[in-house]
Amino acid sequence: MEYRDAGRDDVEAIQRIARASWERDYPDILSRETAAAEAVEEWYGREAIERELETPGSALLVAEDDDEVVGFSHAVVSGGEATILRVYVHPAYRHEGVGSGLLERTIDEATDRAAERVRAMVLSANEPGDAFYRSVGFEPVDTGETVIDGEPYEETVYELGNDA
């Protein structure tokens, strides 16, 4: 598995992985036809991804297996704090260490950019996301809200523990 910074050529793969992940993880939370499609376009559309690639403090990484992008992560580092917004792995490549590898490299990137605290956010109803972050030493510390297709959804905010 190779991990690297994402580039403009990765946009379609990022969209494909986001769509597959949302369909797999959120079928009872979001409508596949509307909310998932809207969120993929809003958060992972070509313009949105290209803007993130150019934004100082944004870290967008991909995981590649045999020249195929199979996962990605997105974090924002600002003011000594990193917030991991997404770690998505295509469902066909889960449970192979891809997500853990992406997370490790994302944390390394945040540390290299002087982040002293690392947080992550996941929809609260996303049980696989909750289990993933807890399994690698993140602890829930707060809740927040995000809006998808005009509807509010609760998010859980996690923080990396000092002993992780």
Image (tube, rainbow, N blue to C red):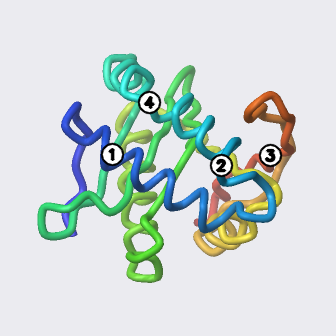
Residue 4 vs 135, above or below: the answer is above
The quadrant of the image that shows the N terminus is: bottom left
Determine which residue is flagged by label 1: 61
Q: Nearer the viewer, residue 18 or 129?
A: 18
Distance of label 3 from label 1 (alpha carbons): 22 Å
Q: Secondary structure at mark 2?
A: helix
Residue 44: horizontal and vertical position, in percent? 47, 35
Three-letter amino acid code at disc 3?
A: Glu
Determine which residue is flagged by label 3: 155
The quadrant of the image that shows the C terminus is: bottom right
Which sits earlier in the primary sequence, circle 1 or circle 2?
2
Which sits earlier in the primary sequence, circle 1 or circle 4?
4
Marks 2 and 4: which is nearer the front?
2
Rendered residue at 54%/40% (across/down): 40
Rendered residue at 22%/35% (across/down): 7
Distance of label 1 from label 4 (alpha carbons): 16 Å
Q: Which mark is residue 33?
A: 2
Distance of label 4 from label 3 (alpha carbons): 22 Å
